[in-house]
Image (tube, grey):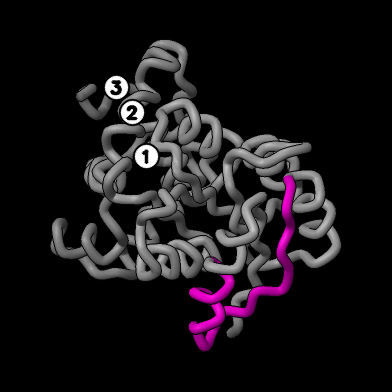
Amino acid sequence: MTIRVLIADDQDLVRVGLQMILDNEDDIDVVGMASDGREAVEMARTLRPDVCLFDIRMPELDGIAATEILAGPDVDDPLAIVIITTFDLDEYVHGALKAGARGFLLKDAGPELLVQAIHAAARGDALIAPSVTVRLLSTFADASSPSTAVQPIDALTDREEEVLLSVAAGHTNDEVARELFISLSTVKTHLASLMSKLGARNRVEIAMWAYETGRVPKI
């Protein structure tokens, strides 16, 4: 299946560079490019791409605001959005993921990680650059306390707690399977159960919940 991608960045060279990288992939097709956030939202609504690749800082509407419009908690049919930026700042990552982004990458992450993030977002997964994953997710613990975080009606099983902590550490499904000596399909089953119990839409929100409820020590 070909993954249809929309790129939004206010720098011409960046847009063209991202397009060149993605066009080299047999299963990725860049279907549109926008130079500001408002244009990106309009194109996304018209084209309905499989994945949107948004810069944080754009004129008219920034990447976080555009993400919330297209993938926020109140959106019935959210688009998959990956945020890419040169700014490694906690508040940007926090804002982007809270707004519904499925991935966050720095522009120096490299082509391989960019392609991985596109594939992850397209299949409903999520990827955050390894250089920022644990450190930045840990900042979510400061945003709310365990007493105010939403608690599931049905308690998590011991295995679900183990999967939760592994996901919060930034591990992929394959890594979770190897770490816990379970099959990949079993990992996916536990993730589906966690999303249902926690009201999470993807693994990033699962990881955020783990930090917000104090299950992972602050760093």
Image position of 127 (left or right of 50): left
Q: Which residue is mark 1?
A: 207
Q: Which residue is mark 2?
A: 211
SS class of the residue under badge 2? Answer: helix
x, y (%) of residue 2?
60, 83
| Residue 199, disc | none
The reply to whether the magenta stretch includes residue 183 is no
Answer whether residue 15 is visible to the viewer in this image: yes
| Residue 214, disc | 3
Identify residue type, mark 3.
Gly
x, y (%) of residue 144?
43, 15
Disc 2 + disc 3, Cβ < 8 Å = yes
Label 2 – label 3 distance at C-alpha: 5 Å
Identify residue type, mark 1.
Ala
Identify residue type, mark 2.
Tyr
- How packed mark 2 is, by other alpha carbons closer than 10 Å (few <14, some 14-19, many 20 or more), is many
Which quarter shows the C terminus?
A: top left
Which residues fall within the magenta stretch? 18-36
Above or below residue 92? Residue 38 is below
Above or below residue 118? Residue 86 is above
Name which residue lies at 45% across and 19% down.
149
